[in-house]
Amino acid sequence: MENIIIIAILLVIIGLAAFYVYRAKKKGQKCIGCPHSGECSASKCGGCEKK
C-alpha cells in the first residue's frame, strides 16, 4: 500500500512539472526559469546565457 501512495505522489509531481513546462512553452518563453524569458525576442535570451 505504501508503494502505491509513493508512486501516486511521484506521478503528481512529475505531472505538475510537465504541465508547468507546457504552459511556459505555450506562452512563448524560450528558456524556462529565466526571469527575462518572456521579454526576449532573440533566439537566445541575453539574461539566460551564462557569462
Image (cartoon, rainbow, N blue to C red):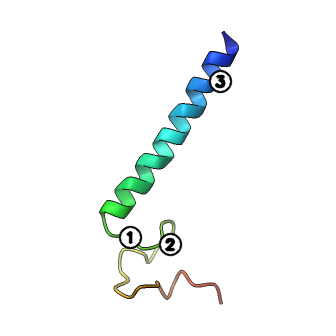
As drawn, the label of residue 6 is 3
In the picture, the quarter occupied by the N terminus is top right
Badge number at residue 34: 2
Between discs 2 and 3, the one toward the N terminus: 3
Instruction: Name the residue beneath numbered marker 1.
Output: 29
Classify 12 as above or below 1.
below
Q: Characterize the local packing of mark 2: few (<14), some (14-19) or many (20 or more) Cα atoms within 10 angstroms.
A: some
Q: Is residue 39 left or right of residue 10?
A: left
Q: Which residue is located at x 37 percent, y 63 percent?
A: 25
Q: Earlier in the sequence, mark 1 or mark 3?
A: 3
Category of crowding for the residue at label 3, using alpha-carbon neighbours closer than 10 angstroms: few (below 14), some (14–19), many (at least 20): few
Q: Residue at x 51, y 84 (%)?
A: 47
Left or right of residue 29, residue 8 in this image: right
Q: Position of residue 18 (x, y in %)?
A: 46, 48
| Residue 2, picture quadrant | top right
How many residues crowd mark 1 within 10 Å: few (<14), some (14–19), many (20+)?
A: many
Label whose residue precedes the other's in the sequence (1 or 2): 1
